[in-house]
Amino acid sequence: MSTQPQHFLYEVRDGVATLTLNRPERKNPLTFASYAELRDLFRALADANDVKAVVLTGAGDNFCSGGDVHDIIGPLTKLDMPGLLAFTRMTGDLVKAMRACPQPIVAAIDGVCAGAGAMLALASDIRLGTARSKTAFLFTRVGLAGADMGACALLPRVIGQGRASELLYTGRSMNGVEAERWGFFNSVHEPEALLEAARAFAQGLASGPTFAHGITKKMLQQEWNMGVDEAIEAEAQAQAICMMTQDFHRAYHAFVAKQKPQFEGN
């Protein structure tokens, strides 16, 4: 993918794309334009053969403070219902694009992770954080429902219905230690080691069977709406497809030769 985004930093190295929200002086808030550009980038990643995994992070000491108060919240108070619905659908489309892109997304979360920023973290596949981070689904703090960008569907599946209900009703902050204990963070790191840990995790995924990773992500998303019997059948079909890949054969021959397989994603 050759396009260079205008509203955040983007680089690809050794199969790992690092996407950095880059307004550190304001704790990396989102604007109308950056929402749309993020949505478009994650959609485009489906065709980015050079990208095997993604790291999502924020510049400075914060992840993302959510929608910019001046660039988004203020203008929203002046829109009519069709305009408001167009905006809320657009923000939801960003989460859909993140869940639909085949590459695993590893979020590196330090400092403030609030509102739409918390949803970016939640829509990622893996979340690494710091003890000092503060994650808040603070929609109720501004008089809105906790139901935003898929929060009521996604959060209970990650941390459970009761804990999700608490965070979505109260809008309170969850520190990194609690986030790890509740299963929101996969692991907690020192701030200076966080980004490198996220990149190392993503690099490990990028060097694995990436076609199969894409199938895993697809099934994790798709099976939420299936019964157990349907899910078992869907996984039978998905696994049969993966058994046709060269990576499956490489793994077998490497095992027989007592070597580590070198996956190529095909």
Image: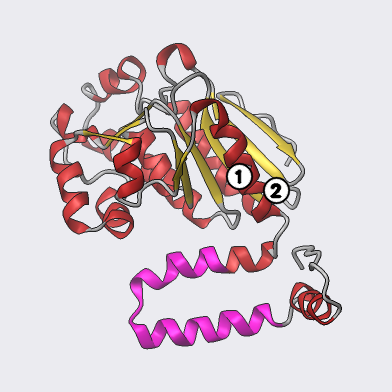
Q: Using the image as rendered, state which of residue 245 and residue 134 is in the foreground.
A: 134
Check the picture and name the quadrant holding the C terminus.
Answer: bottom right
| Pointer 1 with pointer 2, Cβ within 8 A | yes
In the rendered structure, find residue 51 and report the number of the disc placed on it. 2
Q: Which SS type dominates the magenta stretch?
A: helix
* Residue 233 coordinates in the image, percent (x, y): 47, 87
Quarter where residue 85 is shown: top left
- Please name the residue that numbered disc 1 is placed on: 54
The residue stretch that appears in magenta = 216-243
Vertical arrangement, residue 98 with respect to residue 208, above or below: above
193 sits left or right of 127 in the view: right
Q: Where is residue 261? Give x, y as percent.
A: 79, 68
Give the quadrant of residue 114.
top left
For the N terminus, the quadrant is top right
Magenta stretch containing residue 230, yes or no?
Answer: yes
Say what amino acid the circle numbered 2 marks: Val
In the image, is 111 to the left or to the right of 105? left
Q: Secondary structure at mark 1?
A: strand
Query: What residue appears at the point 42 percent right and 81 percent down from the top-left corner?
Result: 231
Residue type at mark 1 is Val
Q: Residues within 10 Å of mark 2 (few under 14, many from 20)?
A: many
Mark 1 surroundings within 10 Å by alpha-carbon count, few (fewer than 14), some (14 through 19), many (20 or more): many
Q: Residue drawn at (68%, 61%), measured in percent from left and top? A: 210
Query: Which is nearer the eye, 48 or 132?
Result: 132
